[in-house]
Each structure stands twice: as structure tokens, then as C-alpha cells.
Image (cartoon, grey):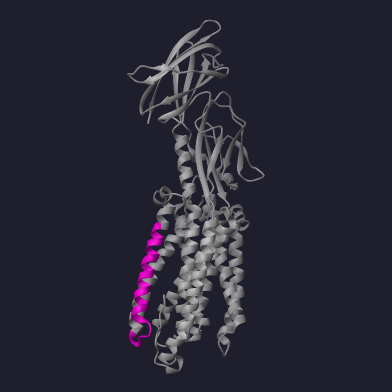
Amino acid sequence: MTYRLSTRRRFFARNPRTARHGAGPWRRRAARLAWSSLAAGLIGVLWASAASAHAAATETDPASGAILDAAPSEVVVEFNEPVTPVDAGTGVVAPDGDRADTDVVRSDDGTKITIEVDADQEGTYLVGYRVVSDDGHPVSGTFTYSVITETEAPSAEALTAAGTDPFVQALLYGNRWFGYAALALAFGAGILLVAGARPRDAVAKLVALGLAVVAMTAVLGLPLQAAYETGTSVSDLDATGLQSVMQSNIGLAALLRLLLVLLALPLMRAVVTAEEEPGPALTAGLAGVGLALGATWPLAGHPMASDPVVVAFLADWVHLTTALAWGGGVFALLSLALRKDAEIPDRTADTWIALVPWLLANLIVAGIASSLLHIDSIEALTQTQYGKLVLLKSGLVIVIVVIGLFTRKALVGRAEGRGRLRLMAGVETLFLAVVLGAVAVLVQAVPAKTALLEAETTESASTETATLVTTEVYTAQLVLEPGRPGANSVRILADDLEGAAFEAVEWTATYGLEGEEPEELRLIELRTGILAGEANLGEEGRWVFTFTLTDAAGNTATAVAEVDVS
């Protein structure tokens, strides 16, 4: 927010009248910059199209819950974007609980993984997958299929990477929070340093502290990300997992972060040791390094898996950089207010006053653009973790803006305002710390549109129902898909008592709610032993399916399958 801290050392302050007149052009320039940023940003918002910033399984072969006549030699899982499989967590568990997979193959475009299977046991198989999307987030899932007959699904214990270690998740959140906070401190203190805040060495130490912590979090983040992706603890991490992260966008971003910190050190030294204020070239160099540091986070996040990538990257970059610069400036002002020897000349205050509206304009517009890429409905906003975090963050930002307005109104140009500056900047800093926490979780959350897609896919897969019936002539399974009220596909898979496909030559079938008059179910033969049709299940309840199958030898039997639909 905007503050002017008067000092007792008069040679740092201009005449109040001159200060007021000198601030006018700054404010007019800030207004023009803010409006231009809003206009440019709105164009970006309108250009932003649908995005998919998180991998989700879209189709499997065999289908979830399928009952097959013979064991498949491979299982295929397709995704909505390129992924990299984690071998330890991707495989097939046979009915006896042992691994049945022999290899995992990634397609050329990365959107499909093929799990080769070597098993011929009858019963239910468990398929588990763990993949890493382009934005560095692991995605896990399981589904089952059966060969000949359904049995109890085997345990997933044979898949060594079944999920994310909560402790690793917490450490990753914390590391990201400290990285954001450190970069914010470097941004904010750097702005005040270039604008002439005093003492120069104290402000420079704040910048150096921020850069040091940024470098530290870049290094610590690599093993944490590797453990997060592979689903292991940090102590169980192997070189393969770490190498995979180093070769990903996240590893590249961490390396760039370290190099940029090293590049910033000689520039900072030049600022601190110079007898005069930093010139345009040095200021531009520091600004360039800061902007490049801000770009390393979206380089390894959701934008790289979004469409269009350029819009998503720019929106995230601008949003993050302006937010950190604003928040870091508030914290730097608080740090200076706590020092008795701190000096904030009028030029420094005017620079900050002019910069804040421009930062807020870019922050708001880029935030809207970024949100529209991942949230396309009220349901996505209110019923997903991602959407709820966006609402929380937006509410907190509004509160911070209001606090800042009151702070500026109360303290600008008042010599007695140092104590109130400490209080109000401290309150703002606390709220900003909470916002950073929400952001640290938000960037690890599944984007809203993808979360809804996963929920719909899971719901569709989990509601497929299969009912086994046995007669004196054949055994049959009646399968409903999706098994919910409304239109359903019906499959009848029939085998004779020796396990071979039942060769029916005649068949009749009816269905209806229990206790009501049934209606005819028309069936066609897909192949020997498999009949299919369509049924409209108008409401929830117990539906009764009755079918009679007859073979060429005249062997006939009637089966009744009762299915609870909800």
C-alpha cells in the first residue's frame, strides 16, 4: 500500500508543498498505466480459451468393471494431456494378489500408457496407475476388470506407490510458501532500495535475505518434488525419481532460479557500493532479473499444461509477480518502520504511491484471466477445492486493499504516523501471509474444470453394475451401464456349465420396476454368448430383468436378475 514516513533528518525530505506538487505527475502517470494495463488485460481475458491444466484419465481398455471372456495381454489408459508414468505405482494386480504386469509403455504423444499383462487367472484384476502431468502434479487412480467371473478385488499393496505421503505434501506446501515470501521480500525491498530508501545497506540486506531463501527453497524443492511424484517418503527416494524431476520443467525452473540469484549478486553489490543512486541501466538489470525470477514459477506450474500456453503463462506470471511485488513492498515498509534509523524520502514514497495502482490493476486483470482458464462454471467455483481457494484468496485480497486504503488516508504526510504504520503494515503482512498460504495450496490443487471431469469420470465408472445369475443350463451376468436412472445399455454374458460361451439361438427378455408390469427388452447378439440392448430406467428402485435363452439342442432356461438402481 502507499505510505509516506516523515523523518527527523530534514535533508532527506523535500518541502511539503514541493512534495505535493511533485507527486502529481507520478499519480497521473500511475493512473494512465493502470488504465492501459486494464485494457491490455481485458484483451487477454477475452482471448483466454478453455484450458486443461491437470491430467485426468479419459478412457480405459478394458473398461472399468468389464467382464471379459479371456484375459487381455495389455491394459490401456488414455489421458487428456501428455503424462509420464511412475513405474512403481503403475501396474496390474492379479486375483491372487501378485503383480501381473511385465512392462509399461508410453505412447509417442504421451497421452496413452499401455500396461503389458501376463496372466490368465479367472477373477477380478486391479489396475493402478500413477502418472505425472506436464505441470509436475502426480495423478493416481485404480479400476478393476474381471476375466470370466467376478471375485473380490485384490489389494493394491503390490503397487508400491499408491499415494502421496501427507508429510511430503506438507513440506512441499511449506517450501513453496517460503519461496514465495522470500521472492516477495526481494521484490519489495528492491523497489524501495532503487527508489532511495535509507539506510541503503539495511534495505540491501533484506533483498539479499530474500534471494538467499529463494535459492534455498529451489534446492530443497527438488527432493520434495521427487518424493511427491513417486509417492514415497523423502528417506525412501531413489536416484531415478530425483533424475526424473531434474529433467522436467520443475528441475529446469529450479536451476534457472539458482542462476538468476547468482546473477543478481553482482548487481546488488553495485547498488550498495555506489555513491550515487543506481542509474537506469542498473535499475533495468535488477528489474529484468526480478521479472525472470517471477517467471520460473509458472514455468513449472499449471500454465505449461494449459491451452493456450502463452496466455496461461503470461497471466500467471503477471499475477504472481505483481502480487509478490505489492506484498513485498508492504513487508519492506514494515521492516523499515521498525528501525529507528530508517529513512523513506519523499521520492521513495512518491514512487511507491505511483506503483501501487499499476500493480493492483495488473494483479486483478491477470488473476481474472488465470481463473477463467481453469474455472468455467459456478459449479466449478463453488464445488471444487480449486474454486474455493480462489474465492478465499479473492476475499482476502479485497480485505487487504481496504486496509491499505485506510492506512494511506491516515498516514500519508503525517510525521506522527510511524507507530500507526507499524500497526497497519503489520496487519496487512499477516493477511498477505495467509494469501500466500492459499496460493501455495492452490498451485498444487487440481484445477476446477479437471476436478469436475475426474468426478464425472469416477462417478460414471463406479456406477456400472453387474449381476450374476445361475440356471440349470447356463450362468450369465447382466451388466448395466452406467447403472443410474435414465438410458442404460444392457449386456448379457452367458456361458454354459462347462465355461464355454452359450450358443443361444432364441431369446426373450423383459424388464420393469419390482411389482409393476414389465416391458419387452429387445436384444441383439454381438457375438456368441453376448447379447445387448437398451433399457430406459425411469426412476430409482429395484429393477427386475427376466430373460430366457435357448440353444440349438433345445436346452432352455429362464433367469431373473434383480438390480438396485440409484
Q: Principal SS element in the magenta part?
A: helix
Write the residue at 39% across / 87% down.
6
Q: Which of 238 and 342 is in front in this view?
A: 342
Q: Which of 159 and 380 is in front in this view?
A: 380
Q: Quadrant of residue 98?
A: top right
Picture coordinates of residue 180 (x, y %)? 49, 66
Q: Can residue 395 be found in the magenta stretch?
A: yes
Residue 485, visible in the rendered structure:
yes
Residue 300, visible in the rendered structure:
no
Q: In which quarter of the image is residue 68?
A: top right
Q: Nearer the viewer, residue 396 or 250?
A: 396
Q: In this view, which residue lies farthest toward the top? A: 554
Question: Is 343 placed above or below 183 here?
Answer: below
Q: Can residue 337 be found in the magenta stretch?
A: no
Range of the magenta residues?
391-416
Write the residue at 48% across / 81% down.
26
Q: In the rendered image, which quarter contains the N terminus? A: bottom left
Q: In the rendered image, which quarter contains the C terminus? A: top left
Picture coordinates of residue 22 (x, y %)? 47, 86
Picture coordinates of residue 335 (x, y %)? 42, 79
Q: Which of 553 and 460 is in front in this view?
A: 460
Picture coordinates of residue 209 (x, y %)? 50, 75
Question: Is 6 placed above or below 219 here?
Answer: below
Q: In this view, does 359 lie to the left or right of 395?
A: right
Q: Is residue 514 left or right of residue 13?
A: left
Question: Is 511 placed above or below 47 here?
Answer: above
Write the residue at 47% across / 56% down.
371
Count the labels in the image.
0
